[in-house]
Image (cartoon, rainbow, N blue to C red):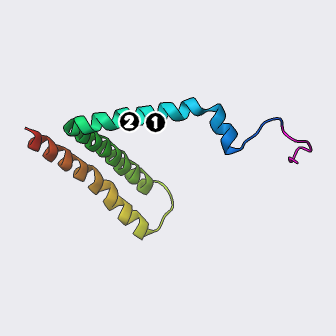
Amino acid sequence: MSIFGSHPDFDFSLSSTLARNWTVVVARGVLGLAIGLIAFLFPGPTLLSLVGQFAVFLIIDGILAIVAVSHGNVSVTWRASHSAVGFWSPQTTTAAAVDGQEQEM
């Protein structure tokens, strides 16, 4: 019995959902194998792209930490710790990216 009073005409069980969407599962598996094979065959560019993605994440995180500190009504301790994170994160990311590029050359 559903909350609407009658039985629904669809099934949300795992087996019926998988039966309807098996192509998505197969496509995800094939894509995962292809990406894994590329990462195994080309470890340098894979590592470089992961470091680049992490650097972008840290820069955005640092900017958002600074914005969060400048806005809002928060305690002094929270503000000080997030100011340090916001200031330190972009510098650390830049240093790591520059150091990684120097080691590549």
Left or right of residue 19, residue 86 in this image: left
Mark 2 is surrounded, within 10 Å at the Cα level, by few (under 14), some (14 to 19) or many (20 or more) other residues, namely: few
Q: Helix, strand, or loop for circle 2?
A: helix
Which residue position is annotated with label 1?
Answer: 29
Question: What is the quadrant of residue 103 in the picture?
Answer: top left
Q: What residue is drawn where x is 11% and y is 40%?
A: 104
Say if mark 1 contacts mark 2, CB within 8 Å.
Answer: yes
Q: Helix, strand, or loop for circle 1?
A: helix
Give whichever of 23, 58 is nearer the camera. 23
Give whichever of 61, 51 is nearer the camera. 51
Give residue 27's position: percent from left, percent from top. Answer: 49, 30
Boundaries of the magenta span: 1-8
Left or right of residue 91, residue 33 in this image: right
Give residue 8's position: percent from left, percent from top. Answer: 84, 39
- What secondary structure characterizes most of the magenta part? loop
Which residue position is annotated with label 2?
Answer: 33
* Marks 1 and 2, how far apart at CA: 6 Å
Q: Is residue 78 magenta?
A: no
Left or right of residue 16, residue 59 in this image: left
Q: Residue furthest bottom?
A: 77
Name the amino acid type tagged 1.
Answer: Gly
Mark 1 is surrounded, within 10 Å at the Cα level, by few (under 14), some (14 to 19) or many (20 or more) other residues, namely: few
Left or right of residue 63, residue 22 in this image: right
Q: Is residue 5 magenta?
A: yes
